[in-house]
Amino acid sequence: MYKNKITQALLLGAGLAVAATSTLSIAAEVPAGTELAKVQELVRGNGTEVATLDPHKSQGVPESHVIRDLLEGLVNQDGDGNTIPGVAESWETTDNKTFTFHLRKDAKWSNGDPVTANDFVYSFQRAVDPLTASPYAWYMEYTKMANAKDIVAGKKDKSELGVKALDDYTLEVTLDTAVPYFVMMMGHTTVKPVHKATVEKFGDQWTKPENFVGNGAFVPNQWVVNERLELVRNENYWDNEHTVLNKVTFLPIENQVAEMNRFLSGELDFTYEVPNEHFRRLQKEYPEDVNIKGNLCTYYYQFNAQKAPFDDVRVRKAMSYAMDRDIVTKAILGQGQKPAYFLTPEITAGFDPVTPEYGQLSQKERIAEAKRLLEEAGYTKSNPLEFNLLYNTSENHKKLAVAIASMWKKELGINAKLENQEWKSYLDSKDTGNFDVARAGWCGDYNEASSFLTLMVSQNTTAGQHYKSADYDKIIDKALSSTSEEERTKLYIEAEKLLAKDMPIAPVYQYVTTRLVSPQLGGYPEGNAEDKIYSKDLYIKAK
């Protein structure tokens, strides 16, 4: 299988990198002798209703799953998570500060227009434009594209962004500082292109199926809100001849038991997740359907550190320490998840975590320290801490919230009132700071520690973080400007130590992806730690 050599080179540091010259891109690879089903239609669970199909307005995992099929960026990933060509068939850099991408000349939009370098210039500028109000504008800053930070802050015009079309099929991106993993970052949802004429004609309505123009392997056909989002093949996609599926349907099923039942009845080819309480039974009765793989994600509870009493580090630490992560991972989840005492997952490439001091204590010792801290902060069983615990609609999130709230009540006398909101409202509540404590999860946007640690910087505008630490910001700034992989690693560990000291979040567990996957589904990416699934790589085998 093709491995893009330049990406590997870029990860090694800021030394010279050679060009990637192959034009190969992974598509559906059907093994010889495989009999395909006559009907090539995929149905998958997607957790919840998507908030948007606009890549510059999106911030959730369900949205990214769909957008990945509709829009193609400069690069994609293969089934093992390696960066491979997308619209860019090759690229080069000599200093990790200026990157030149060579676009394939056969890439087209679904209306037949050619995909050009100017499309990416427009799209990148749109992502940083304050008028777009992209929740992921911060991500553009962390690519270190020249002037991105000042543009997002309203100090410079979007036209000054470090991106230009040298010609229709050559894109040059200039960075403020060397970023050895920059090409990896180009696989993210926020740097997908959009069709300028369509966006300008329809405004916010451009994502409606009847208006949508994309450059991915599929286009939206029908969107029934809270019921189904149906995609069909984009006949103008440059590699359409290697796409096997004719239709992909995303179902927004928030109830995991309902999703499981629909899978078992043959309605779904794979689920978004599985209900925790049925996991062991499913493993026993349907071993060929249960699929478990490591995932580049961390589940955590976030505190609104700008709001009393969670502006008191003693309160935050007490609540974090009192959570029995072993019970969560072994008894409640029990699918291979690991307790988390730091934000960055252990499987992150090049990351060598150091378990903080509280993570090395026994649970009995942690609870004793939690009681001491909470009392010191002025809360006792006679004067209990009371607050709302926010989670988005999901039986699994609810079960976990009930269990952790029970731990807090039993050990510390804390009264946590559970508050459930649907996805869009939940995101808004977190973004605006209208919450006390909230469940959250973060999945790496690329496989490098900064993808997690930049989440916690003060100016971050996504995921509802409300941690403001000048010291933390300095560490991350220094890490991102370093050309030494060794120094960056040390600074990442320092950043994690500071998070453990300030506790703006309470890490709970490191994810695994557990799904029900039909044995008839071919091409499922078992080795992709970021869980990036491209429907163009999938196919349905005959029974």
Image (spheres, rainbow, N blue to C red):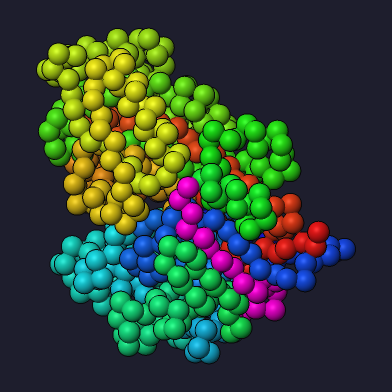
Instruction: Tell whether position 465 is magenta.
Output: no
> In front here: 518 or 151?
518
**Quadrant assignment, res 41:** bottom right
> In front here: 344 or 41?
41
Residue shown at the point (45%, 70%) measured from the top left: 224
Rendering coords of residue 532 (x, y %): 55, 56
Q: Where the N terminus falls, by quadrant?
A: bottom right
Residue shown at the point (42%, 67%) measured from the top left: 225
Query: Looking at the picture, does residue 127 appear above or below residue 413?
Result: below
> In front here: 330 or 21?
330
Is residue 316 in sight in this rendering? yes
Tell me: 27 left or right of 203: right
Query: Looking at the picture, does residue 144 appear above or below residue 321?
Result: below
Rendering coords of residue 527 (x, y %): 63, 48
**Quadrant assignment, res 314:** top left
Tell me: 354 left or right of 81: left
Tell me: 139 left or right of 230: left
Query: Looking at the picture, does residue 72 appear above or below residue 44?
Result: below
Extreme-bottom residue of the structure? 112
Is residue 188 in sight in this rendering? no
Residue shown at the point (44%, 83%) measured from the top left: 210
Q: Where the C terminus falls, by quadrant?
A: bottom right
Rendering coords of residue 5 (x, y %): 61, 58
Extreme-right residue of the structure? 33
Rendering coords of residue 341 (x, y %): 40, 28
Which region shows up in magenta? 237-255
